[in-house]
Amino acid sequence: MNLDAMPLARQVEFVFKQLEEELVHAVAGTVTIHIRNNVVGKYGVRHNPIESKNGQIGDKAAAQGMTEAQVQAFRKMAVDSLRMKRSWTHGEIIYDFSVRAGSGVWAASITYESNYNLANGLFRYQPKYTQQALRDAP
């Protein structure tokens, strides 16, 4: 698949489809998407720590995490949130999410981080004089 030809919204939708299996039943965590030249470079999920009691990891957490419908809503929210992105082409988008235990209510927050490379702007050749100015000089 050629990501260069896809708009960023389609790429973000693709990312969430790839992470869907990991997000279903997740209680809380962070989805991170790295962008370079408006192309998704890498992405992933950081799950918040899994709780255990008396050294045993329980299966109750699996029943309390995000449902498939909530993951679909999360994906739609992530794509819709791209309207807030302005003019930058390099950076990260970070989606923090959590599901309240017992209630099934979920919440997410979005953080944008734009990155710029000063060296690219400083070392572009910009002639001080044009050829015509040099010919007209005394």
Image (cartoon, rainbow, N blue to C red):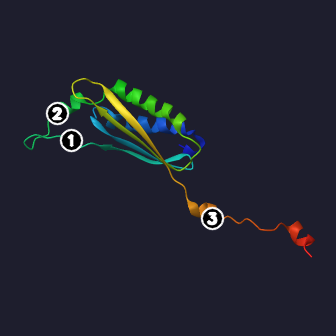
Q: Which residue is mark 1?
A: 50
Question: Three-letter amino acid code at disc 3?
Answer: Leu
Using residue 83 as the reference point, say whether residue 22 is left or right of it: left
Left or right? Give the position of 110 relative to 64: right
**Label 3–label 1 contact, CB within 8 A:** no
- In the image as oriented, which residue stretches furthest toward the front? 138
Find residue 138 and report its horizontal and vertical position in percent: 92, 76
Q: What amino acid type is highlighted by mark number 2?
A: Asp
Q: Can residue 71 be seen at all in this image of the molecule?
A: yes
- Of circles 3 and 1, the one toward us is 3
Tag 2, which secondary structure? Answer: loop
First along the sequence among labels 1 and 2: 1
| Kind of residue at disc 1 | Ile
The residue labelled by disc 2 is 59
Residue lying farthest bottom? 138
Residue under label 3, please give it. Answer: 122
Residues at marks 3 and 1, CA–CA distance in whole angstroms: 47 Å
Q: Residue at x 73, y 65 (%)?
A: 126
Residue 64 is drawn in which quadrant? top left
Name which quarter of the figure residue 108 lies in. Answer: top left
Residue 2 visible in the shown view? no
Tally of marks: 3
